């Protein structure tokens, strides 16, 4: 199943150049759309991290924040990876939705750490 997710990730640039997959109506479109939504949340996570980490370093708790972030990444993966073990064409959609929801929650936590 992980092969399918990797294949989807490889195909997204070419597919999304043709159209936004969030406008489509097929399961493949829904899978691509879910990944696009996660990518938006992940870009926001990286933007917030670039603000929060230097502030934490200045306060002397940057290493603790980094350790917390690494633990969160492992927990996120542990929560979402089982979605890939399910059979069916919707498995990638469920996986990317899980990744998005986990990331959105983490974004809120990091924003409160400012």
Image: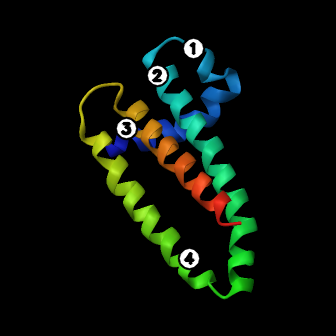
Figure colour scheme: rainbow
Task: Name the spot of residue 41 as percent of width and height, x first.
Answer: 62, 45
Q: CA distance from mark 1 to mark 2?
A: 8 Å
Give the residue number, with chain letter if any, for mark 4. 66
Q: Write the residue at 61% across / 53% down.
A: 107
Q: CA distance from mark 2 to mark 4?
A: 36 Å
Within 10 Å of disc 4 (Cα), the crowding (few <14, some 14-19, many 20+) is: some
| Front in this rendered view, residue 59 or 81 | 59
Of helix, strand and loop, which one carries label 3?
helix
Foreground label between 3 and 4: 4
Q: Write the residue at 53% across / 41% down.
A: 10
Point out the tag, 2 or 3, that comes first from the N-terminus.
3
Task: Name the spot of residue 112 as percent of width and height, x first.
Answer: 65, 60
Point out the tag, 1 or 3, that comes first from the N-terminus.
3
Is there a contact, CB below 8 Å, between mark 2 and mark 4?
A: no
**40 left or right of 100 in image:** right
Q: CA distance from mark 3 to mark 4?
A: 31 Å
Give the residue number, with chain letter if any, for mark 3. 4
Is there a contact, CB below 8 Å, between mark 1 and mark 2?
A: yes
Circle on res. 80: none
Give the residue number, with chain letter if any, for mark 1. 24
Give the residue number, with chain letter if any, for mark 2. 28
Foreground label between 1 and 3: 1
Dividing the picture into quadrants, the one containing residue 16 is: top right
> Which image quadrant: the N terminus?
top left
């Amino acid at each position: 199943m992980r092969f399918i997710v990797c294949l989807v990730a490889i195909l997204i640039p070419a597919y999304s150049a043709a159209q936004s997959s969030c406008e489509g109506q097929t399961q493949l479109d829904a899978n691509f759309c879910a990944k696009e939504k996660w990518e938006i949340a992940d870009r926001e996570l990286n933007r917030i991290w670039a603000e929060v980490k230097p502030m934490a370093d200045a306060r002397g708790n940057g290493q603790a924040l980094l350790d917390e972030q690494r633990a969160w990444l492992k927990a996120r993966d542990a929560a979402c990876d089982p979605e890939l073990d399910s059979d069916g064409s919707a498995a990638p959609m469920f996986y990317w939705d899980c990744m998005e929801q986990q990331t959105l929650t983490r974004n809120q936590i990091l924003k409160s750490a400012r």
